[in-house]
Structures are given as C-alpha cells and as structure tokens.
Amino acid sequence: MRRSLAWWLGAWSVGLGVAAWAVEKKPAKIDKAASSLGQPGEIVRRTIEVGEAVDVEFDRSGFWDESGKYEHEYAGETCGFLSYAFPGVDRPLRKLSITARLSAERGDNAGKPEETSDVTASVNGVEIETRTVLADNGLGESYTFALSDPKLLKKMNLKPGPGNLLKLEIKKTAKNQRGMCVYGRSVGYDDPDPGAPILVQLEVGAAPKKK
C-alpha cells in the first residue's frame, strides 16, 4: 500500500515525540563519586576528633577526658607540634579554614595572662596563619586560621583521600612558647555546651577545564 508524503511526515513527527518522551522520562544517572567532591562555591566540612593526633613532638603530651569542661590533648612545656590527618576534595579550593578551641598548657589550668603561645596552623606543609592563644584556663577559646591565596592553595596540593596533614605548631622561633591544649567535646554531665571537634572548611572552586 502506497503512503502519501503527508502520511510519512506525520508518522515521523509522532516517532520523534515518542523518542523525546522516552528521553525525558528516563532517570538521569548520578555519579555519586563526583557529586561527593563538592560543587563550585560549596563549603565541604571535615571534622577531626581531638585525641586522634597522628604525630606529636613535644617534651610531654597526653589526652585528658576524666573531668573538666572539655576533653583535650595537652602538649608542653614549650615548642613542638601536633599533626592530624583529614580527607580533602578532588577540586581546586577558593578558601580553606581551620577552627579549633585552643589554649597554652600549664598543667593546672591556672596560667597567668601573659603565659600565652603562638600557634601556627599549616596543611601539607603550607602555612595558613599564626595566632596567639590565651593562657591555660582549662577551657580554651575558639580560633580560626584561614587561607584564600590561590597560589598557596594550589601549592597545598590537597588530596581527595585522608592523606592530608593539619599541623598545629609552636615554632622554636615563636615569641610565646608555653605549650598547647587542643579541646574537643564536653565531658560535663549537665553542660549545655557540647564542645566540638576541630573543624576544617573547604570552599570548593571550579573544576579545571579539560584540554
């Protein structure tokens, strides 16, 4: 049976409509691995539990969670460092910040106001900032170290896996060297403040363009 041109055009248009409907209704595939890496402008948060230092270099150090307001790692008496591992993202960064509750270390929570420490935060060997933290009071104070220099962020070479190292250090050249306490979660029974682990915030940039 012969078909007219109008008939064939009509059948063709119907076929396109069915195909379009099929494409529209087909669920999109989601790359879970890629979606977990962060989108441009997104802030990816990583937490580091206090007590999980992977390297310590001080004359004395330890972990305390038996009494007081917060569990904490202590390290004294003068200079040294604590290092922690954390996972990064497989994207360039716009900004990186570290927030931690810190103080100097005296051993009796009764540091004099002038007994402070200069703490330098670095990631993968790239320095972020140096902050002077208060004397040992058994509570500490929240400090944020931030970096947004594109060249330094690139030099940091952040890895998507857990092989990134945060170092909190009191240098041998620091003016104030009275050890360090890094505070975590509350150990108080009726304390409304739960405390917090170390917080790493990674503001994600655009993925590099494919050549």
Image (spheres, helix red, strand yellow):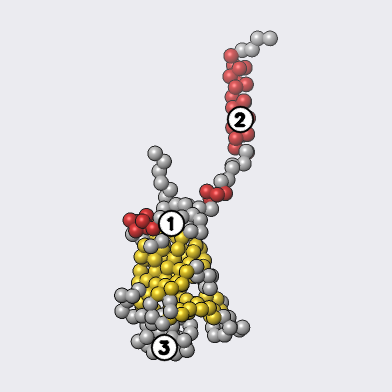
The quadrant the C terminus occupies is top left
Disc 3: which residue: 111
- Amino acid type assigned to the residue bearing label 2 in the image: Ala
Q: Determine whether the residue tagged by mark 3 lies in a helix, strand or loop.
A: loop
Where disc 2 sits, the SS reads: helix
Q: Earlier in the sequence, mark 2 or mark 3?
A: 2
Residue 147 at x, y percent in the picture: 37, 63
Give the mark nearer the N terminus: 2 vs 1. 2
| 179, 19: nearer the viewer | 179
Front residue of this view, candidates 178 and 202: 178
- On the rendered structure, is 21 left or right of 86? right
**Which residue is found at the position 46% from the left and 80% from the top?**
60
**Outermost right residue:** 1
- Residue wearing tag 2: 19
- Camera-near label (2 vs 1) is 1
* Residue at image coords 39%, 72%: 169
Kindly identify which residue carries mark 1.
Answer: 158
Q: Quadrant of the N terminus?
A: top right
